[in-house]
């Protein structure tokens, strides 16, 4: 990795790596601020599908100006690969928080979920479905303020489908049933995934596991989850009911927030 990207972004240190890109902390030498730079792995730079997915992340999130959505500042091509410059967040992923603390207090889980819901509502109102809501894509700072990131497989409205070149796109533990089938997704698909996240916050585990992604996807299609209250008796009855409604198999679950 060069010390400076596109004659503008001075690399400070690596923040982490994902399935398709490295993320670095950098200084924007033009504006004098710290940013996070996501750089597509070199091995994917010539893969049109990955490049399109990477560009889609910038396009999907760039127009979403919301306090609970990570801001996208810039995108470009440099040194034979592609990058996205975005808001740098001091904090940890929700996955890290759950791993370190175990089940969260119901009040905290509700607060985090409400902030994610605000981000999703705004995205949905702008005809963007995230399609990959999971704790890894939720950043939380020391004041428990939430930002949703990684719109890499987001698509606009009903054009969104969950299969590309015959593969499941997304993380199997958080797929909605329609995504597991490769069907078109709707707003309720994000809410199902958020239901999985809420389940994990409350119990410390996801409702469905398996030997491989296909086995997990099949459970999303046919298995009923163990009620979270059975794993954590401290969960109130009404919150347990909300989680179970969120995990309904039917795509018409989109109104669960109002019914819960």
Image (cartoon, rainbow, N blue to C red):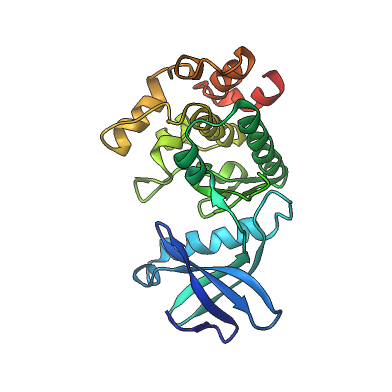
The correct choice, above or below, for 219 with respect to 141 in the image is above
Rendering coords of residue 98 (x, y %): 49, 39
Residue 163 at what x, y percent from top left? 41, 45
As rendered, which of 112 and 67 lies closer to the eye? 112
Quadrant where the N terminus sits is: bottom left
Measuring 57% from the left and 45% from the top, which residue is drawn there? 130
Seen in the picture, residue 184 relative to 106 is either above or below; the reply is below
Number of marks in picture:
0
Tell me residue 157's x, y (percent). Answer: 62, 44
Measured along the vertical axis of the image, is residue 171 above or below residue 87?
above
Q: Quadrant of the C terminus?
A: top right
Write the residue at 71% across / 47% down: 126
The reply to whether residue 132 is in sight is no
Residue 105: quadrant of the picture:
top right
Q: Residue sitting at 69 percent across and 48 percent down? A: 68
Residue 231 visible? The answer is yes
In terms of image quadrants, where is residue 210?
top left
In the image: residue 52, left or right of residue 63: left
Q: Residue furthest left?
A: 211
User: In x, y percent, where is residue 180?
Assistant: 41, 34
Q: Residue at x 68, y 44 (%)?
A: 119
């Amino acid at each position: 990795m060069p010390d400076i990207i596109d004659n503008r972004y001075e690399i400070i240190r690596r923040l982490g790596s994902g399935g398709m890109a490295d993320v670095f902390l950098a200084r924007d030498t033009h504006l004098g601020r710290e940013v996070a730079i996501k750089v597509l792995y070199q091995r994917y730079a010539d893969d049109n599908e990955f490049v399109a997915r990477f560009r889609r992340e910038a396009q999907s999130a760039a127009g979403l100006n919301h306090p609970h959505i990570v801001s996208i500042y810039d995108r470009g091509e440099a040194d034979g690969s592609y990058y996205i410059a975005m808001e740098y967040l001091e904090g940890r992923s929700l996955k890290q928080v759950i791993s370190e603390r175990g089940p969260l207090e119901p009040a905290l889980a509700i607060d985090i979920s409400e902030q994610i819901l605000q981000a999703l509502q705004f995205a949905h109102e702008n005809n963007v479905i995230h399609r990959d809501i999971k704790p890894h894509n939720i950043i939380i700072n020391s004041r428990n303020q939430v930002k949703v990131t990684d719109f890499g497989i987001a698509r606009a409205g009903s054009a969104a489908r969950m299969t590309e070149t015959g593969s499941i796109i997304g993380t199997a533990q958080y797929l909605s049933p329609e995504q597991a089938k490769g069907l078109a997704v709707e707003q309720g698909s994000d809410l199902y995934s958020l239901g999985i996240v809420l389940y994990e916050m409350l119990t410390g585990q996801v409702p469905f596991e398996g030997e491989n992604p296909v086995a997990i996807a099949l459970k999303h299609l046919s298995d009923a989850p163990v009620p979270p209250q059975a794993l954590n008796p401290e969960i109130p009855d009404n919150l347990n009911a909300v989680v179970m409604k969120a995990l309904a198999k039917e795509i018409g679950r989109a109104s669960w927030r109002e019914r819960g």
